[in-house]
Image (tube, rainbow, N blue to C red):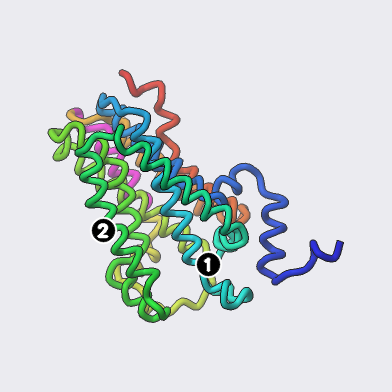
Amino acid sequence: MNQTTTGTPAELTLKAIVRHSGPLALWHLLSLDAPTIAALWTWFIASANHVSLPPVSTLATFIAVWMLYAADRLMDARPLDVDPGDCDGLEARHYFHHRHRSAFLFGIFLGSIALALLLPHIDPQVIHLYLVLGGLVSAYFILIHATRTASARQKVAHFLPKEIAVGLFFAAATFIPTIARCPNLRSRLLPFALLFAALCSLNCLFIYAWEHAGSQTNDDSRNPLTHVALQNLSSLSVLLALSGAVITLFDHQAPWHIPYAIALSAALLLLLHNHRLAISPVTLRAAADLALTTPLILLLFLHE
């Protein structure tokens, strides 16, 4: 009986969270949220443009994004190997990954094998574009995690904030399969890709603001763009929602489903922000990604 009540305060908090977590919180703790969104939007963007994607393309996106996010959270949790009480900047997801790191590492190993088996069935042009994107993501990943000191990591993040980088990389990953199969769509989908990148960055910025509410973060270490964005999250949400709505109403040359889904997701993020104090932190974090599942609402309209 005593074994269940021992451990650091962070570990005891994590046990309580897991014990009382519903499916939504576990979806987040298992790092299934981001790959679900990536796979959903990859399929949605293609379907909205009447592009037929093989199922292996969407599956490969899910696996690759899961591996990246699981690895990122394991790397973020490395300070716990040195000092289990070092909880500076760490959230429940980091403790969960650290506690189950062997299972996550084995999952990443299996994911690597699965990706190797799927590669021969993926369009070579898609693979080429993903290799370019993967090189950029890997370089940023190394710069963030390979630096030895917190000050060095802050310098890297100052030039390209993680919230902005995630938005750009995430949007690129979801649009690549469609534009690789139909290069003529590149110019037409560029505004939508930028809008979706803004939505993904907004999602990350909201999460950052919620998780650091009340903390004494040194503003000098932040990128000026990030600092301005964090001070104007509500206004940015309204602007993004209105932009998506305007494009939906007046751009009749491109599929309306994509900007409509972006506008709806931005509105849902703002709704969550306004009710954040009534929602538990882990559930709120998971709900931020759930707000990006708006393509599911438009399933009936995709083949109009």
| 113 with respect to 278 (left or right) | left
Q: Which residue is mark 2?
A: 136
Q: CA distance from mark 2 to mark 1?
A: 23 Å
Residue at disc 2, secondary structure: helix
Count how many numbered circles sit on residues in the image: 2
Disc 1 marks a residue whose amino acid type is Ala
**Residue 117 picture location, percent across and down:** 37, 38
Q: Which residues are magenta?
A: 237-252
Residue at disc 1, secondary structure: loop
| 121 with respect to 111 (left or right) | left
Residue 77's label in the rendered image is: 1
Report the predominant secondary structure element of the magenta stretch: helix
Question: Dividing the image into 4 quarters, which one contains the N terminus?
Answer: bottom right
Q: Are marks 2 and 1 in contact (CB under 8 Å)?
A: no
The residue carrying pointer 1 sits among few (fewer than 14), some (14 to 19) or many (20 or more) residues within 10 Å by Cα, namely many
**Residue 184 picture location, percent across and down:** 13, 33
Q: Please report the residue visible at 35 percent of the width from the left and 49 percent of the height from the top.
A: 199
Does 247 lie within the magenta span? yes
Q: Please report the residue visible at 47 percent of the width from the left and 65 percent of the height from the top.
A: 75
| 22 with respect to 31 (left or right) | right
The residue carrying pointer 2 sits among few (fewer than 14), some (14 to 19) or many (20 or more) residues within 10 Å by Cα, namely few
Does 221 lie within the magenta span? no
| 188 with respect to 52 (left or right) | left
**Residue 227 picture location, percent across and down:** 36, 69
- Please tell me which residue lies in front, 118 or 287: 118
- Please tell me which residue lies in front, 81 or 44: 81
Q: Mark 2 vs mark 1: which is more N-terminal?
A: 1
Q: Is residue 232 among the parts visible in the rendering?
A: yes
Q: From what the image shows, is residue 27 above or below residue 83?
A: above
Disc 2 marks a residue whose amino acid type is Leu
Would you identify the image quadrant in which residue 114 lies?
A: top left
Q: Is residue 263 among the parts visible in the rendering?
A: no
